[in-house]
Image (cartoon, grey):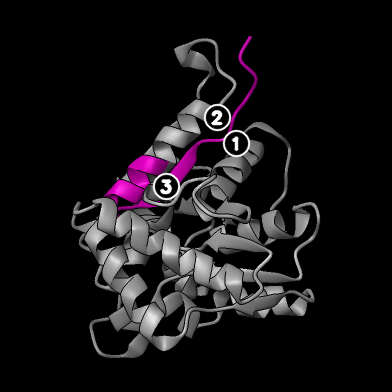
Amino acid sequence: MIKHQKTVGVMGGLGPEATLDFFGKLLKATDAQTDQGHLHVIINNNPKVPNRHASIAGTGPSCIPALVASAKALERAGADFLVMVCNTAHAYEAEITEAVALPFLGIIDVSVEACLEHSPKPERIGLLAADGCLETELYQKQLEARGVECLLPNPVNQRLLMDLIFKVKANKVDDDVRDGMKCLAETLIEEGADIILAACTEVPLVLKTGDVTKPLLSSTDALVAATIAYATQDTEIV
């Protein structure tokens, strides 16, 4: 007998390959022996959402209407809760949750918990995150409130990281992109990072466990684990 499972509503397309990566990892991580054992997942893959970084900076159109529309569409489609495969877009989590009656399982929250549960507990975390995510301090506020220092790329390296992220989005991943991402992570390690957090869902498409000399935690992996736990257990989002 298949026990009751909650239907997952995925706000995707931010970007599409990161959404595909999330879904593929979700399938592999689910303990299912048959098709019926897998989760019911509804994906709204909308790559037309305006640029999140420009929206946050005020230099481009707001992405709030498109994000709210995605959440409402998933609610109408029958999702029991929402996840969003983009770290930066969580700057608008309040606007999304106000627009729907569904629980929202945030990637920032679950990634922070994954970092804090790492053994040994890190004192300094190196963040590989996109501009908008850093500008709104989505991770810095939570981690520093829990006594963990955040190490960020310097301005030159942050521009390089953004260039690499957009190459990944453009499906232009090659050895130079991989080496560049590794170099950025190792720079943060040299500055004292105990672990590296891939705090942009494009980063784990390039940087894998074992690529760097300190532990690498993926925000995508953290969201996958939390999604399965919430969908299959009587877990409440606090």
Q: Earlier in the sequence, mark 3 or mark 1?
A: 3
Instruction: Give me the residue at 34% from left, 54% from top.
Output: 178
Image coordinates for residue 50, horizontal then vertical, percent: 24, 71
**Location of mark 1 (residue):** 228
Image coordinates for residue 145, horizontal then vertical, percent: 75, 79
Looking at the image, is 207 positioned above or below residue 134? above
**Location of mark 2 (residue):** 29
- Callout 1: SS: helix
Circle 1 crowding by C-alpha within 10 Å: few under 14, some 14–19, many from 20: many
Q: Is residue 41 left or right of residue 31?
A: left
Task: Name the image quarter holding residue 142.
Answer: bottom right
Q: Report the magenta residues as a range.
A: 1-21
- Callout 3: SS: strand
Q: For residue 10, which numbered disc appears in the image?
A: 3
Q: Earlier in the sequence, mark 3 or mark 2?
A: 3
Task: Name the image quarter holding residue 35.
Answer: top left
Image coordinates for residue 164, horizontal then vertical, percent: 29, 65
The disc labelled 1 sits on which kind of residue?
Ile
- Callout 2: SS: helix
Instruction: Give me the residue at 24% from left, 52% from top.
Output: 173
Q: Which one is in front in this view, the residue at disc 3 or the one at disc 2? A: 2
Dot 1 and dot 2 residues touching (CB under 8 Å): yes
Instruction: Give me the residue at 44% from left, 45% from top.
Output: 9
Circle 3 crowding by C-alpha within 10 Å: few under 14, some 14–19, many from 20: many
